[in-house]
Amino acid sequence: MNNQNYGDIAPTRVLSAAEGVEIQKRLAAESSGVKQWHWMGNYGSVYDPVNVANGAGISAGELILNINFNNGLIAAWMLY
């Protein structure tokens, strides 16, 4: 991945599910233990952020998706 600062995901970058899982694991490891909302990037398929959330143990209400109908990208935020 080009951007090594995983907390600052470029809004124009489209992530794969594997990249999303890697980013979530790194951010969770740096977390203070208090749940906070994290920008998890844009995805090209609605299944990718859902797979990231399921793989990370994100519970109901801890995933927000926004579908941008102009470019088809799915923006994701996760609470962990």
Image: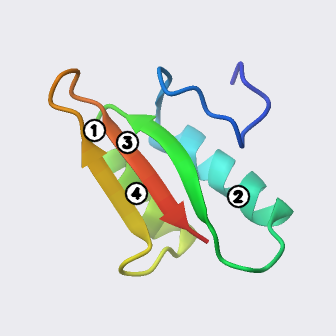
Residue that label 3 marks: 75
- What is the three-letter code of the residue carrying label 1? Ser
Q: For the residue labelled by badge 3, is the local secondary structure a helix, a strand or a loop?
A: strand
**Depth check: 54 or 4 in front?**
4
In percent of the image, x 58 and y 39: which residue is there? 19
Q: Position of residue 15 (x, y in %)?
A: 48, 32
In percent of the image, x 38 and y 36: which residue is there? 43
Closer to viewer: mark 4 or mark 3? 3
- What is the three-letter code of the residue carrying label 3? Ala
Question: Is mark 4 in CB contact (under 8 Å) with mark 2?
Answer: no
Label 1 environment density (alpha carbons within 10 Å; few <14, some 14–19, many ≥20): some
- The mark tally for this picture is 4
Looking at marks 4 and 2 on the same chain, the residue that comes earlier in the sequence is marked by 2
Q: Is residue 52 in sight in this rendering?
A: no
The image quarter containing residue 14 is top left
- What is the three-letter code of the residue carrying label 4? Asn
Above or below, 43 relative to 48: above
Residue that label 1 marks: 45
Above or below, 65 relative to 16: below
Q: Is residue 78 in sight in this rendering?
A: yes
Q: For the residue labelled by badge 1, is the local secondary structure a helix, a strand or a loop?
A: loop
Distance Cα–Cα, label 1 vs label 4: 10 Å
Distance Cα–Cα, label 4 vs label 2: 13 Å
Query: Image check: 44 left or right of 20?
Result: left
Above or below, 7 relative to 9: below
Query: Image check: 74 left or right of 25?
Result: left
In percent of the image, x 27 and y 38: which residue is there? 45
Look at the image and tell me in which quarter the C terminus lies.
bottom right
Residue that label 4 marks: 51
Q: Position of residue 63 (x, y in %)?
A: 40, 66
Distance Cα–Cα, label 2 vs label 3: 18 Å
* Mark drawn on residue 25: 2
